Amino acid sequence: MTITEAPRVKDRRSLRSPVVYAASLLLGLAVWQALASVYGAALVASPVDTVRAFGELAADGTLGNSVVASSRRILVGWLAGLLVGVPMGLLMGRVRIVRALLEPYIEFFRFIPPISFVTLAVVWFGIGESSKVVLIFYTSVFIVVLNTIAGVLSINEDKLRAAASLGAGRVQTLRFVVLPAVVPHVVTAARLAMGNSFLTIVSAEIVASQVGLGALIWTSRNYGRIDWVFVGIVTLGVLGFLFDRVLRIVATRALRRYSVKV
C-alpha cells in the first residue's frame, strides 16, 4: 500500500460504519412494519403509529417528564452502586478475611431479583424517589463488587512481589499495580450495571410511581394504547443506547492511560 492510498482506505473505513448502521436500522424498521402488518395495530403498533404517538406524548410533556424522572433515578442509583461497589470490591479482593466474611452475603443477595424487594422498598422508604433509587443501587452494587474482585484477583502475583521488593507501600501498590489491572473490569461492570438499572427501573416505576417510563408503559396498557406502550419501550432502548455510548466515550478518553477500550 502506498502513502497516497492509506488515507483513501481510512476514509472508506470511516464511511463504512454509518452505512452499516443505516442498513441495520432500515432492516429493523422493515421487520417491525412486517410484524405490524401481520398481527395488526391491536397487538403491534407500526413505526408510523409509534412516531405519531411519540409526537402526541411529547407535545403534552408526558414523555419528557417520564424520561427525566427515569434518567435521574437510574443515574443516582447507578452512581451510588459504583461509589460503594468499587471500594468494597478492592477491599474484598485485597484482604482475604474481609472477602471471607462478606462473600456469603454477596452470593446470597445477588441472586434475589430487585423486583422481589419492591414492596419492602416502598414500605421502608416510601413511594418517593428513595425507593426507586435504592432498588437501582441494589441491582448495580453486586455487579460492580464482583467484577472489581475479579480484577484484583486476576493480578499476577509476580507483579505484587516485584512491587514489594522495590519498596512500594500499600498505597503505591494500589496506585501503580492494582488500579491499572482493575480499571477495565470496573468499566465493564459499570456498563453491565447500567443495563440492569434499566431492567429494574421499569418494575420499580410500575409498582410505585406516577411518573417515569415504567409508569408510562403500565398506564398505556391500562388504557389499551399499544402505540404508547411501544413509545415507552423504544424510548427505553434509545435512552439505554445513548447512556452506554456516552459511558464508553467518557471511559475511553478519561482512562486512556489504563488502555481501556470499550
Image (tube, grey):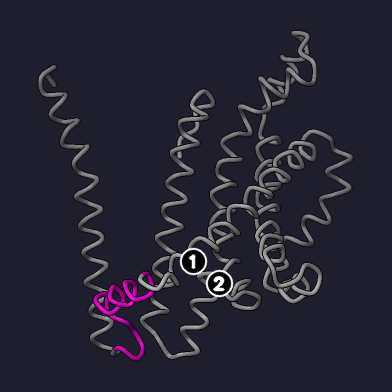
Q: Is 99 on the left-hand or right-hand side of 44? A: right
> Mark 2 Cα within 10 Å, few/some/many (few <14, many 20+)?
some
Q: Position of residue 137 (x, y in %)?
A: 68, 56
| Relative height, residue 124 to residue 163 (above, below) | below
Q: Quadrant of the C terminus?
A: top left
Q: Which residue is mark 1?
A: 65
Residue 223: percent from left, percent from top: 46, 90
Please report the residue visible at 68 percent of the width from the left and 22 percent of the height from the top: 175
Q: How many marks?
A: 2
Q: Nearer the viewer, residue 114 or 118?
A: 118
Residue 153 located left or right of residue 29: right
Residue with the mark numbered 2: 211
Q: Is residue 40 magenta?
A: no
Amino acid at pointer 2? Val
Read off the magenta span.
41-58
**Residue at the front extreme, as displayed:** 60
Label 2 with label 1: CB-CB less than 8 Å:
yes
| Residue 38 drawn at (x, y percent) | 25, 88
Q: Between residue 65 and residue 35, name the one nearer to us.
A: 65
Residue at 89% x, 48% y is 101
- Mark 2 or 1 closer to N-term? 1
Mark identifier at residue 190:
none
- Mark 1 Cα shell of 10 Å, populated few (<14), some (14-19), many (≥20): some
